[in-house]
Amino acid sequence: MTTATTPSDDAVSFDHRHIDLENRDDVYVVGDVHGCPDALDALLERLDLGGNDLAVFVGDLVRKGPDSEAVLDRVRRSPRLLSVRGNNERKLIEGSSSLPSLRPVDYQYLESLPTAISWDGGLVVHGGVDPTRSLATQTRDDVLTMRSPEGDGYDGPFWFDAYEGPPRVFFGHTVLETPIEREWAVGLDTGCVYGGSLTAYDVGNERFVSVDGPDHVERSAEKIVTPDDSR
């Protein structure tokens, strides 16, 4: 059982932004968009965010889908939309991948994204956490790319099957057939760009809101996780 707690500035080695939800009405966490603006627009229409509402994205706003620039425009321009950095944002920043359509302002925005966003009792990251270690010992790379502490990618075992909190971790990165809702882990990458859905989690009301996603990229069925609801 991990002893991880919500991070403070001097407790972790990765950068994060702590937010206060006290004056917020509805708060949502949104899964991987992957450059699919139509699905994002449909989801935002469903959520119908008010002035005191907030949606936090788990990263991977970009790549694979048809229009990463449009997705970045929507998220960057709204004070009600925040995001952490995903591995696909990191690829663009580090230059291992490129999107010719992106402008300098887009790269400035990508570089500004924190590795994590936290609030009292909650932590949003792209990948996950190692359930055998405290947050204080985890690196930026750990929380950005975590799937399996002992395996390689989709080989498992997956971190969220052993994680017992706190905090409650909201994550993407691992493509799920259906979203995960557990006491200490909420998984939100439901394969929007692969013809699955784009999913948000209503934190206050503990419910999922999903819209259908376009099928832009083929993906092997072996790389889609079917959650074990018995946990």
Image (tube, rainbow, N blue to C red):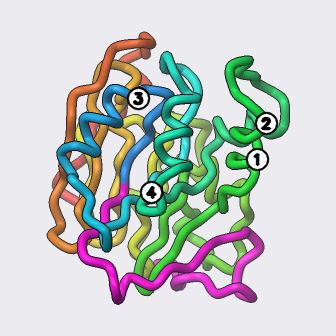
**Nearest to N terminus: mark 3 or mark 1:** 3
Q: Are marks 1 and 2 in contact (CB under 8 Å)?
A: yes
Q: Nearer the viewer, residue 113 or 108?
A: 108
Mark 3: give few (<14), some (14-19) or many (20+) Cα within 10 Å: many
> Whole-percent x and y of residue 118?
51, 75
Q: Residue at x 34, y 86 (%)?
A: 23
Residue 226 x, y percent position in the rendering: 27, 37
Tell me the mark number nearer the camera, choosing from 3 and 2: 2
Residue under numbered circle 2: 104
CB within 8 Å, label 3 to label 1: no
Does the magenta stretch mainly form a helix, a strand or a loop?
loop
User: Which element carries disc 4, helix, strand or loop?
Assistant: strand
The quadrant holding residue 10 is bottom right
Q: Residue at x 72, y 56 (%)?
A: 112
* Part of the protein shown in magenta: 1-29
**Mark on residue 4?**
none
Instruction: First in sequence, mark 4 or 1: give its number.
Output: 4
State the CA–CA distance, disc 3 to disc 1: 20 Å
Name which residue type carries label 4: Leu
Mark 1 neighbour density, 10 Å: few (under 14) some (14–19) many (20 or more): few
Residue 160 on the magenta segment: no
Q: Which residue is mark 4?
A: 81
Q: Secondary structure at mark 3?
A: helix
Q: State the residue position of label 3.
A: 37
Residue 23: within the magenta? yes
Secondary element type, mark 1: helix
Mark found first going from the N terminus, 4 or 2: 4
Image height of 177 relative to 117, above or below: above
Q: Which mark is residue 108?
A: 1
